[in-house]
Image (cartoon, rainbow, N blue to C red):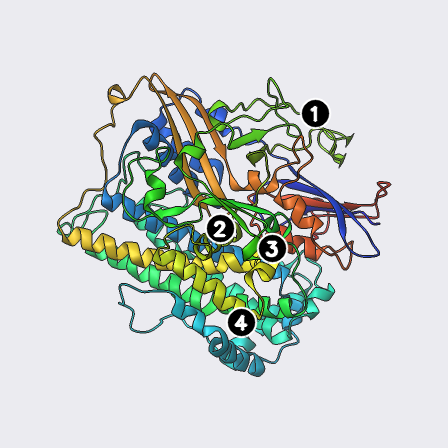
Amino acid sequence: MKRVVVDPVTRIEGHLRLELVVDEKTGKVKDAVSAGTMWRGIELILKGRDPRDAWAFTQRICGVCTSIHAYASVRCVEDALGIKIPKNANYIRNIMYGTLQVHDHTVHFYHLHALDWVSPVEALKADPVATAALQNKLLEKYGGIAELMPDPLGHRAYPRKFPKATPGYYRAFQEKVKKLVESGQLGIFAAHWWDHPDYKLLPPEVHLMAVAHYLNMLDVQRELFIPQVVFGGKNPHPHYIVGGMMCSISMEDMNAPINAEKLAVVEDAIYTQAEAVNLFYLIDLLAIGHIYVQKGWTYGGGLAKRRVLGYGEFPDEPYEDIKGGDYHNKILYHSNGVVEDFAKGLDKTKYYPLVGKDFTDPDVIQEFVNHSWYKYPDESKGLHPWEGITEPNYTGPKEGTKTHWKYLDEQGKYSWLKSPRWKGKPCEVGPLARYIITYTAVKQGHVKPSWMDEMIVKQIDTVSKVLGLPPHVWLPTTVGRTAARGLEAQVGVAANLYFLKKLYDNIKAGDTTVANMEKWEPEKWPKEAKGVGITEAPRGALGHWVVIKDGKIENYQCVVPTTWNGSPRDGMGQQGAFEECMKDTVVKVPDKPVEVLKGIHSFDPCLACSTHLYDTEGNEIVEVKVQGGIPAC
């Protein structure tokens, strides 16, 4: 048994700590603890405020998954007050949402997760001529994945951004990286274990190709977010409004927020998204993932093998409400449900739908605080978000001080994250969960599939054919979690093209309305109201619940994806997705746990974290510090 401390893991957002028990002989993680070490407290800030302003506050929960909390918040307040948004607002919101998915997934893969798989040091061993040849070979081998994406507009004659598969291109990037390595100052490539044996799994040319694209996408990613800027006024934190959108439309006014010129800019950006995803992201992803799976890398699924949860997205047309069920009548992405035992095979998989009434049922979704630094009147029971309490109760670590923890107390309270549960059970959320649910719902005949559902099923079946494995084997793994994120980025592009065409057609029909202001004034609201706002954030199922009384927020609760995935164990000892993923991972070099980083990064956590491995006696073997020392990861 060994213990390793990594303090903190980088390339994620926020603050998280992980502690693991590893069997040195087998490399198997025997136990794991994940602890959110930052208290958000937004719910308390919102109490007593105007519900029309809630989106602007909740959006500041995170600057990485920018706009998604605003999206959930306006839906939440609209649900409470009975506001139906106009068609144009629905189409625009969907484009902004799809754009967030494309940008977030692409940036996550290249700039937060890719360096768990590829190494700039290994890239120095590559032959630029062979790399150029490999790039063309991979485009030929995996390029068919692009054909799965429908294009209802058909306005792009040829791709403007295409991988530069020339020896000169790769030689230039290799020289840049070589200078960094020889200087001893790796800059953006610093702080990692480049001598780990996993980096030998890929040929050097794959390393060089992916590292070159890493640098390429640092520039391209700015263009992916343009639709958010045009429709929302800025990025990060674009503008929304309860009742619709703020961006008025006029095809005659050249100074209007939305006119023909601005729509052309949006269209060009969406086609850039398509090229970034189809010609770079998915090709690199399949090239890396295919080799890893062939080498037996089919672990890290953890909780995804047993239970996943999703809420559903992309309402095709405006809906009347969420809690009443109309939202789920209108969505194109039928990821709303819970699926159990997917890893046992489709014939043994169990599917449970999630619809409007389930989000108001106090027995369906609850949050527990048995091991969280909060207090409830009765901590043996969970609370529905409408009844949720955010009262801190920090007890400190098992050993150490308030500012320097040595060990967490897994028998007591050890995290600022609560423990969300579906009917008392933990669930994994995120792109992997959404893909498992949608695939199961369609294949088992639970839903009438939309074009989007059919696209997702085709994606999964196509990748299964490439890998030579059935979905239940490769999908609930660390590789599968990473692949689902890339495939979903392609769905985001397809949705953007689809809803942009709908927006064009509606404007051509003479409708330029972007907001419904009939219930804007508080005197038109009921004395008391409750609302639910749900969406599928890039990282997973996101829900906001509000209680409005006398025109002010009485209670507001956010149950976010990383709370589901990173939750501490509950009173029954059930662990969350982070902890289960780590327990389903094999570590080759215990004091350089790259495999654990792959698993945790595959969730795209909205946290910053430190990782610890220890033996059953609690003997510390090695500690690697980032702050105040040499970066470790």
Q: Nearer the viewer, residue 150 or 303?
A: 303
Q: Residue flagged by tag 2: what amino acid is it?
A: Ile
The first of marks 1 and 3 along the sequence is: 3
- For mark 1, does the 10 Å Cα neighbourhood hold few (<14), some (14 to 19), or many (20 or more) residues? some
Q: How far apart are the alpha carbons under marks 4 and 3?
A: 19 Å
What residue sits 52% from the left and 42% below the top? 561
List x then y, in percent, for residue 290: 59, 69
Q: Which residue is mark 1?
A: 395
Q: Nearer the viewer, mark 4 or mark 2?
A: 2
Whether label 1 touches label 3, CB < 8 Å: no
Q: Counting other residues with Cα less than 10 Å from the Cα at mark 2, is it few (<14), some (14-19), or many (20 or more)?
A: many
| Residue type pointed to by label 1 | Thr
Q: Which mark is residue 600?
A: none
Q: Is residue 402 above or below residue 15?
A: above
Who is closer to the viewer here, 491 or 393?
491
Q: Tag 2, which secondary structure?
A: helix
Residue pointed to by mark 3? 343
**How far apart, in angstroms, are the residues tagged by discs 1 and 2?**
38 Å
Residue 613 or residue 234, whichever sits in front: 613
Regarding residue 51, the answer to whether it shows in the image is: yes
Q: At 45% from the left edge and 40% from the top edge, which residue is drawn? A: 354
Mark 1 element type: loop
Residue 480 higher or lower than 280, as above or below: above
Q: How far is the residue under mark 2 from the one under mark 3?
A: 12 Å
Label 1 or label 4, whichever lies nearer to me, is 4
| Local SS, label 4 | helix
Q: Is residue 223 visible?
A: no
- Residue 212 drawn above or below residue 531: below
Q: Residues within 10 Å of mark 3 (few under 14, many from 20)?
A: many
Q: Is residue 137 left or right of residue 30?
A: left
User: What kind of residue is marked 3?
Assistant: Ala
Find residue 437 and name its label: 2
